[in-house]
Every structure is written in C-alpha cells, then in structure tokens.
Image (cartoon, helix red, strand yellow):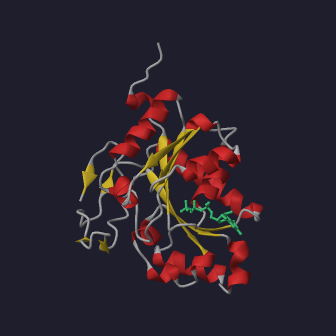
Amino acid sequence: MPDTTPEATRAFRLGVAGPVGTGKSSLIAMVCRELGDELRLGVVTNDIYTDEDARMLRAAGVLDPERIRAVETGACPHTAIRDDVTANLLAVEDLEADFAPLDLVLVESGGDNLTATFSPALVDAQVFVLDVAGGGDVVRKGGPGISRADLLVVNKTDLAPHVGVDADLMQVEGREARDGGPVIGLSRTDPDSVAQLRAWVLAVLGDHRSGQHVPVDPGPMAPHSHADGGTHAHAHAHAHAHGASGDHSH
Ligand SMILES: Nc1nc2c(ncn2[C@@H]2O[C@H](COP(=O)(O)OP(=O)(O)OP(=O)(O)O)[C@@H](O)[C@H]2O)c(=O)[nH]1
C-alpha cells in the first residue's frame, strides 16, 4: 500500500504574496501552464469573502479544477498566511493527500497589504509580486517581502511605458534592497521573462529536494491598524531561519 502519511506526501510549498491586483493569480496560472506537464501541481487561494481567485484560476483551464482549493480568510487575510495558518495548512494537506504525491503546491495570499508575508510554517519559499502600475517608488518603500522573499517579481513590465515607470530601474532598486537577491521583471507578453520565472521555480524546487534550500522567514509585517481601531504589531519580533530538518535558530 502506498505511504500516504503527511511526511511521505508533502509537496514543496511555494507562497505568492503581494498587494492587490499585482498579478498573483496570473503568475500562478503562468506557472501551471509552464510546468503542468512536468510537475504534479496544486493551488490554494486566499480571498477575504469569496472564492474569486480560485474561480478565476479554474476558469483559466490551466489545472484540473479539483486541484484548486479556496480558503476564505475573513477580514484579515494576512493573519491566515502568517499568524494562524491552520486553515491554509489544512487546505494544503488535504490537496497533498487527495492527489498524492504532488510536487508543488502554490499558495496565493489574500493580498491586502504591502508588507504581508507568509510564515515558514506554511510555505517553504515565497515570491513577492509588485507591478509597475503601483508606481516606481514602491520598491523603495520596502518591507519584509520586498527585501527578503526568496524572489521579487516586478510584474507587468509591458505596462511600464504607459504608466511612466522605469521597469529596469525598479529591478535595480529591488536588487539593492535585497542585497543582490533574485529579482525578475515579468510580463506575460515577454517569453524570456516567463522562461526566467519557470527556471527559478525549477531551481528552488531542486534545491529544496537536495536539502540546499533553507526556508527563511522574511520577518513580520509593519504595524498596522484594523477596522476595530486597534493597532497590532503581530507577535514575532525577530527573523527565523529554519533548517530542512525543522530545527531553527533565532
Ligand atoms: N498588462 C499586463 N497585465 C497583467 C499581467 N499580468 C496580469 N495582468 C493583469 O493584472 C490584473 C490583475 O491580475 P491578477 O492576477 O488578478 O492579480 P492578483 O494579484 O491575483 O489580484 P488579487 O487577487 O485581487 O489581489 C488582471 O487584469 C490581469 O489580466 C501582465 O503581465 N501584463
């Protein structure tokens, strides 16, 4: 009988975070299109009140609709990827069990905040997505996702001339903010950039499998206000570096 314990069926889990509308669902659809023939994939989406992103991805026809699960997060979507990841972990583990073995599960964040990042308890690596339409200065505004996610994507570079933004400069500033960490300028109309994204996903998956990839917590989001008027500085005040064995140092 095949071993279906969570340890045996665990996929590589890749988070995709970034502000609303920067193209997270489109990037996930792109990865499914590019790698669906060679990797066994699953997707978990996070939306505040709906399953809009899951429906969009199902409609895109890039993956068996059953392999796309939606988590409805309520008013505070960053909490569901960072502080209480239970609903997301259950969705990922259900997918992994139902379609065992999966190679890669992509988790899309709810995208409510420029500084929201995933907990390493939920994902093994994370991509942070900005777009040129959000303005050329957004990289300089910084935040844990921009400076410490495993990959920064500057998306929709095709729009740069239309919105008066220098997409190359955004990428240079991104690399500076990340101490040389990887940055990809992406557009669905630019096959070279799509190939770069594809290659990055395969490389980080390879590193994960060989034990060379160390999940890193980008760190907590900036203090922020909730609708109830309270200001929360979510608990973790320090960055963690988790080893593949689950050991972690502070
Ligand atoms: N011009 C251009 N538009 C793009 C590109 N990628 C995505 N878009 C468009 O950007 C818009 C937002 O894309 P989504 O993928 O829905 O963005 P999202 O980050 O998932 O949005 P939320 O889930 O609402 O946070 C859509 O209209 C996409 O068609 C691109 O490379 N170029």
What's the residue at 67%, 70% (across, down)?
Answer: 156
Residue 117, picture quadrant: bottom left
Q: Position of residue 213 (x, y in %)?
A: 45, 51
What's the residue at 69%, 44% (across, down)?
Answer: 62
Is residue 88 placed above or below 77 in the rendered structure? above
**76 or 247: nearer the viewer:** 76
Task: Say whether residue 231 is left or right of residue 107.
Answer: left
**155 or 152: nearer the viewer:** 155
Numbered label tally: 0
For the question of whether residue 13 can be seen, the reply is yes
Task: Say whether residue 187 is left or right of residue 184.
Answer: right
Residue with the most extreme bottom position: 164
Q: Position of residue 13 (x, y in %)?
A: 47, 46
What's the residue at 38%, 64% (across, down)?
Answer: 218
Q: Position of residue 205 (x, y in %)?
A: 53, 46
Residue with the most extreme top position: 1
For the question of whether residue 40 can be seen, the reply is no
Query: From the image, which quarter does the C terminus lie in?
Result: bottom left
Task: Say whether residue 134 is left or right of residue 116.
Answer: right
**168 or 138: nearer the viewer:** 138
What's the residue at 70%, 59% (across, down)?
Answer: 194
**91 or 171: nearer the viewer:** 91
Is residue 31 placed above or below 116 in the rendered structure? above
Is residue 48 placed above or below 186 in the rendered structure? above
Q: Position of residue 2 (x, y in %)?
A: 47, 17
Q: Ligand 1 is in which quadrant of the figure?
A: bottom right
